[in-house]
Amino acid sequence: MQNHHPSVFVEWVLVFPFLAALIVYTGSFFISRKKGRKWPAFRTIFWFAGVFLCLISVAGPIAHMAQVDFRIHMAGHLFLGMLGPLLMALGAPVKLLLRSLSIQRARSLTRILRSRVLGFLSNPAVTAALNIGGLCVLYTTDLFRVMHESPLLHVVIHLHIFLAGYLFTVSLIYVEPISHRTSYLYRSIILVFALTAHGILSKYIYARPPESVSADEAEAGGMLMYYGGDAVDLMIIIILCYHWYRATTPKETGNDNGVLV
């Protein structure tokens, strides 16, 4: 891979949304606490861990090495597009924000969450298409090489990887107050298709390296994508099955203080 480190400006453009989200989450935490509403410590830990993984994927030494080593790039992809979004989703930022807002503002946010646009974007079939489809375009076309030459594309593609991964995660596991809910069976079927497509793409990368990537790095990166992706997907499967189990056992109830996810 050729050496094209992102500029400091590009890094800050990518870092800013995560820092802003971190500030909003922290502010919501203290406002909620001031109102006497408890918030589980594990959700805060999940949130900070997820933001941290995303930040080191877009700025700093790891982000720089990802520009010259496809194996590091793929590790960053797993952090930014899979593990980071999963941990951030488990932090339940929308639920915390609703607790911190006034009743009027909370109702306004709820109306936005119930909008048709968010209903469309939270459909698992749509989020899977955005997530897996985007990766297919990136790694099977010339886009991967062009991304390293264009600062604008670098920003757009990295934001897409995160947003698509986050939307895909929250559309499968309902930690947040999701208005447009789909059945467990439907979400499970979509997850199986997405997991299969992700595995096929990783094998494609292993066999046919993206342009400017050596065969050795492509093989290592493809294996990392395959097994690393399976590990994160396994976490989603466990959470989805756990929620499904709880839904079929109505006598067993819980809340944020006693239930992990």
Image (cartoon, grey):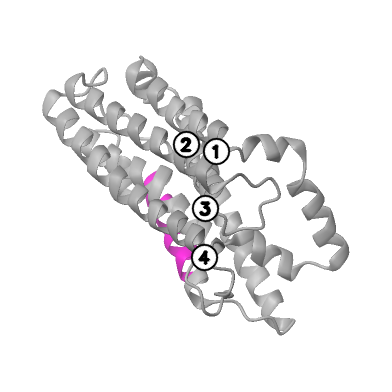
Magenta range: 45-59
Residue 52 locus on image (x, y percent): 42, 58
Q: Give the residue at mark 1.
A: 124
Question: Answer yes or no: do the residues labelled 4 and 3 have beta carbons within 8 Å?
Answer: no
- The N terminus lies in quadrant: top left
Q: Residue furthest bottom?
A: 36
Magenta-span inclusion, residue 55? yes
Q: Give the residue at mark 2.
A: 190
Q: CA distance from mark 4 to mark 3?
A: 13 Å
Mark earlier in primary sequence (4, 2): 2
Within 10 Å of disc 3 (Cα), the crowding (few <14, some 14-19, many 20+) is many
The amino acid marked with disc number 2 is: Ile
Closer to the eye: label 4 or 2: 4
Q: Quadrant of residue 140?
A: top left
Mark earlier in primary sequence (3, 1): 1
The amino acid marked with disc number 1 is: Pro
Q: CA distance from mark 4 to mark 2?
A: 20 Å
The dot on residue 246 is 4
Question: Answer yes or no: do the residues labelled 3 and 1 have beta carbons within 8 Å?
Answer: no
Name the secondary structure under disc 1: helix
Mark earlier in primary sequence (4, 1): 1
Magenta-span inclusion, residue 221? no
Question: Answer yes or no: do the residues labelled 2 and 1 have beta carbons within 8 Å?
Answer: yes
Q: CA distance from mark 3 to mark 1?
A: 10 Å
Q: Tell me which secondary structure the magenta stretch mostly adopts.
A: helix
Within 10 Å of disc 1 (Cα), the crowding (few <14, some 14-19, many 20+) is many
Residue 36 locus on image (x, y percent): 71, 85
- How many circles with numbers are drawn on the protein? 4
Q: Is residue 36 left or right of residue 1?
A: right
Q: Give the residue at mark 3.
A: 173
Residue, x 56% and y 61% (percent of image)? 22
| Picture layout, residue 38 above or below residue 105 | below
